[in-house]
Image: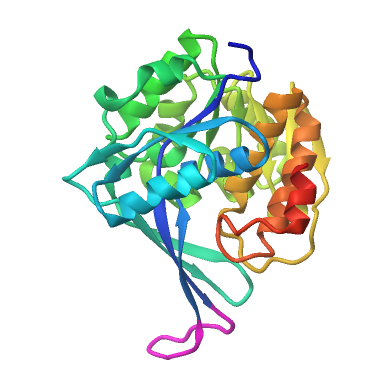
Amino acid sequence: MSGLQKKLVVVGDFAWDVLIRTNQKLHAGGDTFGEVMLAPGGSAANVAVWASRCGMPTAFIGKIGRDRFGELAINDLLRENVQFDPIQTDEHRTASVAVWIDHIGQRSMVSGQGADFYLLPSELPIDIVKDARHLHLTAWSFFTDPPRSAARLAANIAKKNGVTLSLDPGSFQMIEEMGVDKFIQCTNDLGIDIFFPNFEEGKVLTGKSNEEEIAQTLAEIYPGAIIALKLDKDGAMININGKSTHIPPGTETIIDATGAGDAFAGAYLSQYLINENHLKAARFSVKISSWVVNKIGARPSMDRQLLQLVR
């Protein structure tokens, strides 16, 4: 099987997002009108979908409940052309997340620990990991154990079989709660090739507040890794072999930042794995994530503008 025919494999969470958006500031005990909607999400599943939308053959490995939300998850990923052989359980429900989007487009989340948090090493489809072109993990698989042991096993299998590896550190608040040293200890021995933090995650992990210093310090913490630092409205910064390049933003407006980082990672991986050029991948992924933040939800329906971007 040739390199381009091999798939990007993403291991991690699928969750349903309950999106709540208001047009004005919420007041304690108050009432207001807004938008409430149910949408497919989960950081890992989002990355898989965006990579698939951008042209990369993609497979998702994750655990869901044997419930109605699980059935909808299967249908959702198949509709997005993502290979998904579900790991199902009767013991836990398919995950769900409450997402509050404020009047300036910033989001806050409360994540329920659903079936995705109980993925066991024995449940990993090892052959799919072995035959991958690239393996992507998110930090949501590292904050508790399980699924940490399953994620680490997937990473170890991948590296032993010549599969490249990327990681998104996921949440600055969860890193702080876990402990920065413990998080780094659980992730910096995996041989990560591409690291996808946002500014707040980079700041927590390094103790730095300057973008270039964050990127450089992360390159030292994760030796040999390309650092793709997501900067929201300021674009991105890519550190390759100690040299940082700023990628300018693609928009000045943000309606909803939910899932923009996942879209960035999925778009980046698709383009890099197809074209093997990190800077081109970064420029492309900034365009995609800029489109996402001007829509509602982590995976808005594709429109003519997006179709033109991914062609």
What residue is shown at x 64% (from left), y 73% (from top)?
104
Q: Position of residue 117 (x, y in %)?
A: 30, 42
Residue 208 showing in the rendered view: no
- Magenta stretch in the rendered image: 22-34
In the image, residue 169 above or below residue 166: below
Residue 68 can be seen in this image? yes
Comparing 231 with 15, the one in front is 15
Residue at 65 percent across and 44 percent down: it is 264
- Residue appearing at x 53%, y 65% in the figure: 107
Q: Residue at x 71, y 26 (%)?
A: 274
From the viewer's perspective, tell me whether residue 54 is left or right of residue 258: right
At which x and y percent is residue 159?
49, 13
When the figure is inspected, residue 273 is found, relative to residue 38, above or below; the finding is above
Residue nearest the observer in this picture, 253 or 83 = 83
Side (left or right) of 42 relative to 262? left
Query: On the rendered image, what quadrant is the N terminus found in?
Result: top right
Task: State the image coordinates of residue 142 (x, y, percent, origin top left).
Answer: 38, 36
Q: Position of residue 215 (x, y in %)?
A: 68, 35
Residue closer to the observer: 91 or 265: 91
